[in-house]
Amino acid sequence: MTFQNQIPDPGPVIETERFCLRPPQQSDLGLLQMYTGDRRVAEATRSIPHPLPEGATQAFIDRARAPDRVEDVWLLDATRIGGGEVLGCIGLKRMDRNQSEIAYWIAPAMWNTGLATAAVRALLEANPQGCANIFAEVLQDNPASARVLSNCGFAYLGDAETFSVARGASVATWTYSRKLD
């Protein structure tokens, strides 16, 4: 894997063998709308609403490209090797004390293919925000996401709960942390 600072704003492109992680572009609007409009994707996150309101995807792209953003976002793009243009999304939200929180989703057709694990590993290796510590939170009814974190060296911290916009309710979560060298 190589780290290429080809796009200084809104973020670097991170190359892997299977895909690249790249910032969202306006041309991604349709695919992002299709995937985030899927109830299965929305309900596996805390922040994607369902049904997806008009303009929500455009607002997401605009936030991801804003110079004053608090979260850096990358899309998994496999077009270089003949794959899909948008296979999922991963982001790092800045926190205080040189820490960030990682979050991700994968397009349902690509579930159980190792893409989430590969994306998390690539982002950890590149460490584009120069973090000392990364946190993650997964919904307890999504054990596949918990396995991704465990496979990437995250340590379980404890149980909590968060509000899921798509579900309109608080849901139980597992919290994880990973120190970076």
Image: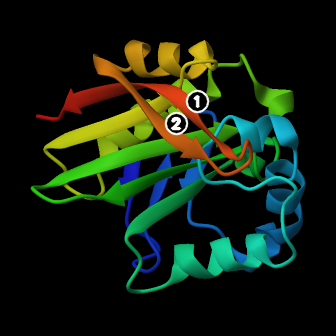
Q: Position of residue 159 (x, y in %)?
A: 37, 21
Q: Nearer the viewer, residue 131 or 155?
A: 155
Whole-percent x, y for residue 65 in the image: 54, 79
**Mark 2 nearby-residue class (10 Å; few <14, some 14–19, many ≥20):** many
Which numbered circle lies on residue 116?
1
Q: Position of residue 8 (x, y in %)?
A: 39, 78
> In the shown orientation, is residue 111 left or right of residue 95?
right
Secondary structure of the residue carrying tag 1 is: helix
**Hey, which quadrant is residue 114 in on the image?**
top right
Q: Residue at x 48, y 53 (%)?
A: 91
Q: Could you tell me which residue is drawn at 42 percent across and 37 percent down?
A: 122
The reply to whether dot 1 and dot 2 touch (C-beta < 8 Å) is yes
Question: Is residue 118 positioned above or below 77 on the image?
Answer: above
View extreme (front): residue: 169
Q: Estimate how packed mark 1 is, as few (under 14), some (14 to 19) or many (20 or more) residues with alpha carbons within 10 Å.
A: many
Q: Quadrant of the C terminus?
A: top left
- Secondary structure type for disc 2: helix
Q: Nearer the viewer, residue 81 or 14?
A: 14
Amino acid at pointer 1: Ala
Q: Quadrant of the N terminus?
A: top left
Which residue was labeled with disc 2? 119
Q: Disc 2 marks which amino acid?
A: Ala
Is 29 placed above or below 52 here? below
Q: Give the residue displayed 87% in from the left and 75% down from the top.
A: 54
**Left/right of residue 95 with respect to residue 85 in the rendered view:** left
Which residue corresponds to the image point at 50% horizontal and 47% vertical from the top-left?
15
Mark 1 vs mark 2, CA separation in Å = 5 Å
Q: Position of residue 167 (x, y in %)?
A: 73, 42
